[in-house]
Amino acid sequence: LEGMLFPSDNPENSPIVLVVPTYAGRDDFTLEKAKSMNQLGYSGFAVDMYGDGKIGDSNEENAAMMQPLLDDREELANRVLAAFDAVSKIETIDTNKIAIMGYCFGGLVAIDLARTGADIKAAISFHGFLAGPENSSNEITAKVLALHGDSDPMVGQDQIESFREEMTNKKVEYLKLIKNLSDDIGISEEETKSLVDIALSSTDRRYVNYEELKDEITTFLVINIFSLICKFLISPLFM
């Protein structure tokens, strides 16, 4: 597995955010978003889930690379734990200030790292799969943020309900963001609309069009989502 580190400008005792890619693998998008953590004063780490930095050439190849890990969640957990262990051993990283975020398949990976009981501050999923592995009984110490569009055709109501039940039963401090956010966390209607219509799936901009939208999504969200988290969950992200 070949992750890539982007140290912050002030690397001593630096917080770090692991960025997990979509099913496409550790592509330029993932590298760019890991590097963008530097703008927030964090180090970034682009996670490699397939090995050798492999990137798929088509949706079919991407799905073929992803499916074995969906079928073997223990192996999936072992791979993301390897990334967590790697960054934890970097002398300049503050091991008390580690978070993870991921997109689509990577969103599942991010939450699965939290499900291992790893000592991370937060796990953030952008329109990720939500279903947990079977017999997942580990305590979750991280705060969890799941950004999920209610029109996402890839995640059915059964996953949403099982995720809610899991987080509630494990007494996890979590937020599942879908819509109607302004009353809950004090952001404006305009910000709410941007989050719902741009960042999350909608009837007009569905999951399958994510490839076309990812730059717009991440330009808005990667820079702003941490301030949103601060308002509701973590305040600040790394306490």
Image (cartoon, grey):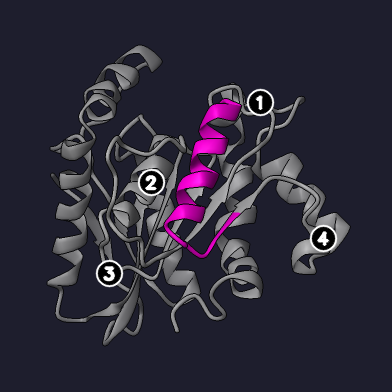
Does the residue at mark 3 contact the one at mark 4 (Cβ under 8 Å)?
Answer: no
Tell me which amino acid carries mark 1. Answer: Arg
Q: Position of residue 233 (x, y in %)?
A: 57, 70
Q: CA distance from mark 1 to mark 3?
A: 34 Å
| Magenta stretch encompasses residue 160 | yes
Quadrant in which the C terminus appears:
bottom left
Q: Nearer the viewer, residue 50 or 99?
A: 99
Q: Secondary structure at mark 2?
A: helix
Q: Secondary structure at mark 4?
A: helix
Q: CA distance from mark 2 to mark 4?
A: 30 Å
What range of the chain is rendered magenta?
Answer: 156-175
Q: Which mark is residue 119?
A: 3
At 21% from the left edge and 23% from the top edge, which residue is drawn?
A: 68
Quadrant in which the N terminus appears:
top left
The 10 Å Cα crowd at callout 4, few under 14, some 14 to 19, many 20 or more, is some
Q: Nearer the viewer, residue 231 or 156?
A: 156
Tell me which amino acid carries mark 2. Answer: Thr
Q: Nearer the viewer, residue 188 or 212?
A: 188
Tell me which label, 2 or 4, sits earlier in the chain.
2
Predominant SS along the magenta part: helix
Q: CA distance from mark 3 to mark 4?
A: 31 Å
Q: CA distance from mark 2 to mark 3?
A: 23 Å
Tell me which label, 1 or 4, sits earlier in the chain.
4
Q: Position of residue 40 (x, y in %)?
A: 49, 73
Q: Which mark is residue 182?
A: 4
* Residue 74 falls left or right of residue 199: left
User: In this figure, which residue is indicated by the disc labeled 2?
Assistant: 30
